[in-house]
Amino acid sequence: MEETFLFIIEVIGTFAFAISGIRLAAFKSFDWFGAYTVGLVTAIGGGTLRDVLLDIPVFWMQTWMYLGVTAVSLAIVIVFRRLLVSNDRMLFLFDTLGLALFVVIGIQKTLAVGYPMWVAIVMGMITGSFGGVTRDILINETPLFFRKDIYATACVAGGMAYWLAIALGRGSVEAQMICALAIIALRMCALRWNWSLPVLRYDPKRKNKDSRHTDTTDRLNDHIK
């Protein structure tokens, strides 16, 4: 039952992330092969890094299904490109769905090989976000992971919700659903009310002003001497 549930959400997550990557590639006017590559990297990038770090067989090398799901995603974007490419909310929806489901997969696979929960949360974040980081690099955009958007933070929050659910005696499938819903809800709330993390800013103009002020003060002190 649980393995079937994980397989279903992995297929849905692959589809959602592939759509988000292909959609951005279409916006950048990539050709079909380039769009497919971006979609595939988005779908498998996080899971690949996770499996390498956990020293287990890389998931997409065990079956052609992930390549096939990405191909189906490309066909859907080609057919419905007007709806999918021109609507920014579509990117948000598919990206959020893929993020939520892949965090669940990352947590489950990490726990299955015997690592503690805090490692599983980190691996969930990597599984959910690293494919998007690679996608954004390939299309020459600053990755969402490094911007003020509630992205990686949502992964950690979902992992904490999973941990809390298990601590309260909930079943594994129920904890997975709570984790995914927590991530989706947090991302939706961030979009609705413009939530974001504080930005680390550096203003070179302020530095120049301070520098000019220091130079003026130094010259005045020299004159007095």
Image (cartoon, helix red, strand yellow):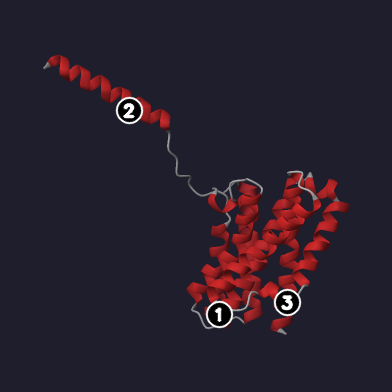
Cα separation between marks 2 and 1: 53 Å
Residue 5 appears anywhere in the view: yes
Query: Which corner quadrant of the image does residue 42 belong to?
Result: bottom right
Q: Which mark is residue 7?
A: 3
**Does dot 2 land on a helix, a strand or a loop?**
helix
Query: Which corner quadrant of the image does residue 3 belong to?
Result: bottom right
Q: Could you tell whether 27 is left or right of 203 in the image?
A: right
Query: Which numbered disc, 2 or 3, marks the residue that appears first in the sequence?
Result: 3
Task: Report the amino acid beneath label 2.
Answer: Asp
Residue at image position (75%, 44%) is 27
Query: Which numbered disc, 3 or 1, marks the residue that appears first in the sequence?
Result: 3
Residue at image position (85%, 46%) is 82
Task: Report the amino acid beneath label 3.
Answer: Phe
The residue where tag 1 is placed is 111
Asked if marks 2 and 1 touch (Cβ < 8 Å), the reply is no
**Residue at the left extreme?**
225
State the count of labels.
Answer: 3
Query: Which corner quadrant of the image does residue 20 belong to?
Result: bottom right
Task: Report the amino acid beneath label 1.
Answer: Leu
Identify the image quadrant of the N terminus.
bottom right
